[in-house]
Image: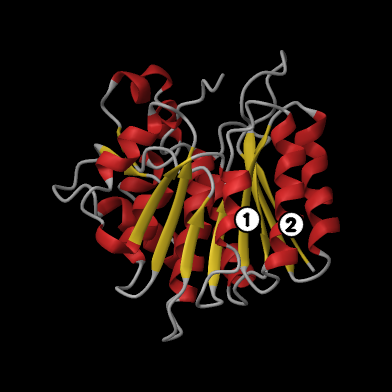
Amino acid sequence: MLSYLHGFHAGNHADVLKHLVLVHCLAHMARKDKPYWYVDTHAGAADYALDDARALKNAEFETGIARLWGRDDLPPAVEDYVACVRAVNPDGALRRYPGSPRIALDLLRPDDRARLFELHSTEIGVLQANLADAGRRVLVQRGDGFAGLRSVLPPPPRRGLVLIDPAYEDKADYARTRDTLADALSRFATGTYVVWYPQVQRRESRDLPEGLANVAGKAWLHASLTVKAPEPGGHGLHGSGVFLVNPPWTLEATLRQCLPFLARVLGQDGQARFGLQAA
């Protein structure tokens, strides 16, 4: 039974890292005239109200996007990401947060396409309603994104950006993520893949980056952002990471500029830090 709803976590530090990387990758894809496909295996609802009961329960956005909102010293790539959030808050007040599908659709060009998968019985309806005006550029499918990804690879234009972003509420998701990436690369070896994962007190979380690196072989980039020490009881999210295969060549230098800033601004205690590895 699926219970995870991203509305409780929208705009938190993990979203900041994931969406900063996503915005950079989307912009890089658009540098060529040839169209591409964006594929999101776990799309969520696409738009989130930060003043509703879910978002306010733990107010995770207050230690995420809210810490960047009023600053005038953002690194350029962080500013590009924050601009995408400002686009859904035209009056300047931080009331809404765009999920990955909304960010992508706002950056796609007329000939680019999006294929979005969502399995949760509640979220799929919200996603469809939120993107009802997206037109022919987007196809929303109810179903398991791990399995659905196979049906859209390789994309017809032979250019694509894939976000693999499960909730990991089931520990089997870690192995499924690794296996899905391996299968995707066998079908579409030249695609750009962005895999997000949580830093939690679970062996599967610690082992996942190495497993992804073994699958990827070469041409990968791994970035992590830890915002606090793990809680004594072993519960909760203390950071997150993104693992990319075939990343934009510009991304490593961009993250070397952005990650120290994010660790400083989003850090919640003296254990805040970042990591960056490449092959």
Q: Quadrant of the C terminus?
A: bottom right
Residue wearing tag 2 = 183
Disc 2, disc 1: CB below 8 Å? yes
- Residue at disc 1, secondary structure: helix
Q: What is the residue that sits farthest to the bottom in this orientation?
A: 33
Residue at 46% x, 73% y is 36
**Kind of residue sitting beneath label 2:** Asp
Q: Toward which corner of the image does residue 202 lie, by quadrant?
A: top right
x, y percent for residue 212: 78, 53
Q: Nearer the viewer, residue 229 or 49?
A: 49
Q: How many residues crowd mark 2 within 10 Å: few (<14), some (14–19), many (20+)? A: some
Q: How many residues crowd mark 1 within 10 Å: few (<14), some (14–19), many (20+)? A: some
x, y percent for residue 83: 31, 58
Residue 127 visible in the displayed image = yes
Looking at the image, residue 206 sits to the left or right of residue 159; the answer is right
Query: Measured along the vertical axis of the image, is residue 148 above or below residue 219?
Result: above
Query: Measured along the vertical axis of the image, is residue 39 above or below residue 230?
Result: below
Residue wearing tag 1 = 150
Q: Quadrant of the N terminus?
A: top right
Q: Earlier in the sequence, mark 2 or mark 1?
A: 1
- Residue at disc 2, secondary structure: helix
Q: What is the residue that sits farthest to the front in this orientation?
A: 151
